[in-house]
Structures are given as C-alpha cells and as structure tokens.
Image: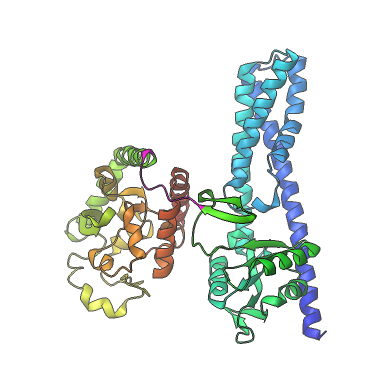
C-alpha cells in the first residue's frame, strides 16, 4: 500500500471515530435537554393546577413523568440517528411521543382505577411536548451552524455516472445542513475521470468496497445507474454490511417526495409505486381559503407599514409608489402583478440596453448591480418588502402564498415542455426558490425547485416554506 493510501485510510478512520463521537455526544445532550423540558413542563402543570398544595400521589407522578417522557421518545424513535439534524421526522416523532404518553397514561389510569386530574394531564404533556419541540429546534440550528463550518459531517462515497455524481456533490455543498459530504466517487467510465468537482474518483463500479474501506466512509450513495443492477446492488449491500456502512439508493425519479412513494412487493419483485401529485380537490380548496384569509389578515396588520413605504417611495423621486407588470399565472393565464417600485420610472425602456450584461445563466434577466435600482429600492429589495403588495394578488386569487416564481410572458414563451409543468399551479409570493438561495440560484436550479414543489405540494410543505421564508428574509441573502 502506498504512503498516500496509508495516509488516506488513516484519515478515514479518524473521520469515522469523530463521526461516532459527535453523534453520541449529540444524542446524549439531546436526551439531557429532553429530560429538562419534561421537568419544566411538569413544574408548569403542578404550579397551574395545584400551586403549593399538592398530594403525595402527584409528587410521585411528577417525578416519574420525565423518565416516562424519555422512554416515550425512545419508543417513538426520537433518538434514531437517521433523523439527526434534518427533515421533519424528528419533530413528528416528538409529537408521536406526546400522543403516545397521553394515551398510555389514560389507559393506565382506567385499568388501575386511579383518579387523575384531567387539568394536570392536559397541561403537563402538551407543555412537555411544546418545550421539547422548541428545544430540539434550537439544538438542530446549532448543529446546522457547526455543519456550515464543516464539522459534524458524515462522509459519503458517491456511485454512478459522472453528471449525477457532480450534481450530488454540488447539492450537498450548497446545503451542508444535511450533514453529508462526498469524499470519493466511483463512476461508470473510470478511468476517464480522475476527479469530479474536486472530489477524487477512486475507481469504477466494482471498486466501491475498496474505496469505502480506504476512506472509512459512513455512507454509500448509489445514484440512478443502469449498470448497478439488482445482483450488483445485492452484492454491494452484503459487502457494506461487514463494515456497518449505510447504503442509500437514488431512483431515476427526480424530486419525488417520500409520501408519494410506497414499496409494493409483487411476484417476488420489490416495486416502487408512485402516486400522482394532488393538484385539485378539497386540499386545493383548503389551500386557496387559507391563502386568501392569511393575505387579508396580513394586509390589515401591515397597512400602516404599506402606507409608510408608499409615501417613502413617492417622496424619493416623485414617481408612483406601485409598479404593475403582466405575469403568467396558473394554466398560462395572464394577470397584473403588484409590487413596490424599486427602479427608476423608465426602467422598462432601459432594459434592452442592459441585456448584454445579464448575470443569469438562463432565460431570466438578472443583474447583481442593476443601475436602474433606486437607493430606496435597494433597501426594499434586500428585505423583500417590495413584494408585499402581491398580497393583493393573493387576495384576488391570481397568486398563492407559496408556489413557483411568477414568470414574465417572454420568459414563459421560451419554456421547454417540461418547464411548463410549473404553470399547473398558481405562482407564489414565496417558494422553494425563495428559501434556497433566491436570486443566487441558477436557472436550472430554480426550475428544479419549482418542479419539486409542484410534484410534492402539501399544506404541511406550504407551512414549512412560510416558516423558512421568515428566516431567509431576516438574513437578506441572495436578494438583488
């Protein structure tokens, strides 16, 4: 073995040791936080229900409840390392633990004929659950900050064709909070490639076990690759089982969320069934009702701010405060979009003169330093408050709170056939593109995110995007 290989293997083993150490520490501190949250919830329940006069039986119950809470979280999968730091599964398991503990307490009370105060239980378990959700959210954000600094990462060997491997590397670098970093690649067509996006290519599809051992990788990600058939995958799984390395498979389906897929064994085969996206029906009615009610409430609450912003824009140069423009909505219908004016009055007439300086790599027109933007407009754009008048578009039913980016007519006219899929839903005031880079995204990445939203829309996803939008706006990143 060469000196380079020895050094590489040593670094890989060191990485594996650090991975096991930080994971163990993370779960230990999470358990301690869970216990403290349970104690806090119990204290709130005792104080509100009994004050200073509490029976001995409730003292015993209050002492046992934090321990029972840890047990409930463990049974609900709240300490599963697969869900550390990413996804909503961790929070769903905390909610399941709260429901399960409530049901177990009620059943135990009925079976043993013990009279328990309903007020105590109604306060205690929801309080514990709420405190735990907030605490775990804070712990997760701290982990995300550490991962952004390159710490607490899990090493991955990517397997597949070079373009797919390059896309995976780019995506994981752009979103380090997932905690995965590609340290090596095994690609079809080796040795035509020596490295991909700065990651060394260490062999072909048959060299995965050797590469995993050399880098002591914790995960192997097999991307859509016809050469990796069932027999090869089964053999690879057996080899990875010896080292305890995780195996992840990426299907050829692009951006299809888990809830739309189910595994169905048929005639000895494992088939992945994909449900059609829900683009109509009662769920869409609920979404539209929520959008309009939320937009009306927001307009009422923000009306003083809107008036101040309009006055500020008008006083800055004497031009109109609002800017209207034709955009393409659902099913290709046109509508007038409303925004606060952030550019000079004749900005549209000067657009053709600036096309040669376009910073976008697609059909969009974007300038990082657009000379047409006014001093007031630059501040409005940074915090995206120039988009607030679009709440009127939401109220009128032309737009949704969450959806794909509203396109200009000349942009929509250049859409490829697959891109037109984004027009089957209403455009949004915010969307996945807003919470994943805003104007810093490439055209292809913006399209991919919009199509991912269309294919996997749900009310829960809308709420998640709205929540993330608040954080993005406070950072003011990617807006110009």
Look at the image and tell me whether residue 469 can be seen.
yes
Residue 13, image x, y percentages: 79, 69
Give the residue furthest to the right: 1
Main SS of residues in magenta: loop
Query: Can I make out residue 478 in this image?
Result: no
Identify the image quadrant of the N terminus. Answer: bottom right
x, y percentage for residue 269?
Answer: 62, 56
Q: Position of residue 47 (x, y in %)?
A: 65, 21
Residue 246 colored in magenta in the image: no
Relative placement, left or right, of 24 versus 452 is right
Q: Residue furthest front?
A: 267
Q: Residue 94, position in %: x, y?
A: 63, 39
Viewer-nearest residue: 405 or 435: 405
Residue depicted at 66% across the width and 17% down the height? 51
Q: Quadrant of the C terminus?
A: bottom left
263, 214: nearer the viewer = 263
Residue 278 covered by magenta stretch: yes
Numbered range of the magenta stretch: 274-282
Total labels: the figure holds 0
Picture residue at 41% right of the left edge, 59% below the top: 451
Left-right relation of 410 to 435: left
Residue at horizontal 24 percent and vertical 68 percent from the top: 410
Task: Classify residue 123 by image quadrant.
Answer: top right
Residue drawn at (65%, 75%), measured in percent from left and top? 185
């Amino acid at each position: 073995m060469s000196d380079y290989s020895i050094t590489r293997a040593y670094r890989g083993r060191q990485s594996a040791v650090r991975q096991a150490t930080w994971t163990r520490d993370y779960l230990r501190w999470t358990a301690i936080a869970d216990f403290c949250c349970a104690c806090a919830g119990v204290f709130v329940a005792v104080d509100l229900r009994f004050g200073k006069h509490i029976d001995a039986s409730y003292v015993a119950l209050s002492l046992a409840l934090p321990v029972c809470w840890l047990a409930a979280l463990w049974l609900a999968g709240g300490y599963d390392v697969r869900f550390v730091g990413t996804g909503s599964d961790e929070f769903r398991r905390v909610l399941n633990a709260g429901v399960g503990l409530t049901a177990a307490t009620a059943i135990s009370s009925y079976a043993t004929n013990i009279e328990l105060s309903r007020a105590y239980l109604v306060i205690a378990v929801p309080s514990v659950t709420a405190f735990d959700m907030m605490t775990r959210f804070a712990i997760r954000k701290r982990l995300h900050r550490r991962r952004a600094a390159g710490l607490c990462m899990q090493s991955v060997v990517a397997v597949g064709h070079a373009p797919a491997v390059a896309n995976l590397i780019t995506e994981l670098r752009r979103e380090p909070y997932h905690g995965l970093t590609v340290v090596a690649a095994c690609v079809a067509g080796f040795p035509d490639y020596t490295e991909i996006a700065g990651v060394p290519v260490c062999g072909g599809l048959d060299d995965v076990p050797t590469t995993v051992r050399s880098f002591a990788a914790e995960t192997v990600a097999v991307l859509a690759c016809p050469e990796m058939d069932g027999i090869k995958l089964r053999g690879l799984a057996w080899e990875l089982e010896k080292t305890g390395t995780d195996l992840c498979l990426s299907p050829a389906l692009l951006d299809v969320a888990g809830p739309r897929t189910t595994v169905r064994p048929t005639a000895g085969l494992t088939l992945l069934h994909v449900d059609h996206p829900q683009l109509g029906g009662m769920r869409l009615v609920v979404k539209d009702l929520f959008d309009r009610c939320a937009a009306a409430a927001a307009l009422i609450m923000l009306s003083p701010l809107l008036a101040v912003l309009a006055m500020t824009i008008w006083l800055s140069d004497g031009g109109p405060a609002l800017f209207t423009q034709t955009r393409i909505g659902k099913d290709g219908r046109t509508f007038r979009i409303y925004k606060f004016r952030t550019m000079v009055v004749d900005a549209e007439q000067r657009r053709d003169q600036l096309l040669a300086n376009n910073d976008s790599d697609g059909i969009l027109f974007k300038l990082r330093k657009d000379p047409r933007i006014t001093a007031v407009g630059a501040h409005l754009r940074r915090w995206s408050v120039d988009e607030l008048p679009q709440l009127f578009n939401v109220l009128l039913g032309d737009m949704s709170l969450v959806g794909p980016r509203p396109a200009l007519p000349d942009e929509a006219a250049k859409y490829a056939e697959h891109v037109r899929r984004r027009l089957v839903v209403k455009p949004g005031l915010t969307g996945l593109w807003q919470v994943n880079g805003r104007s810093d995204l490439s055209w292809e990445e913006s399209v991919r995110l919009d199509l991912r939203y269309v294919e996997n829309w749900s009310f829960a996803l809308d709420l998640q995007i709205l929540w993330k939008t608040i954080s993005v706006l406070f950072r003011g990143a990617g807006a110009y």
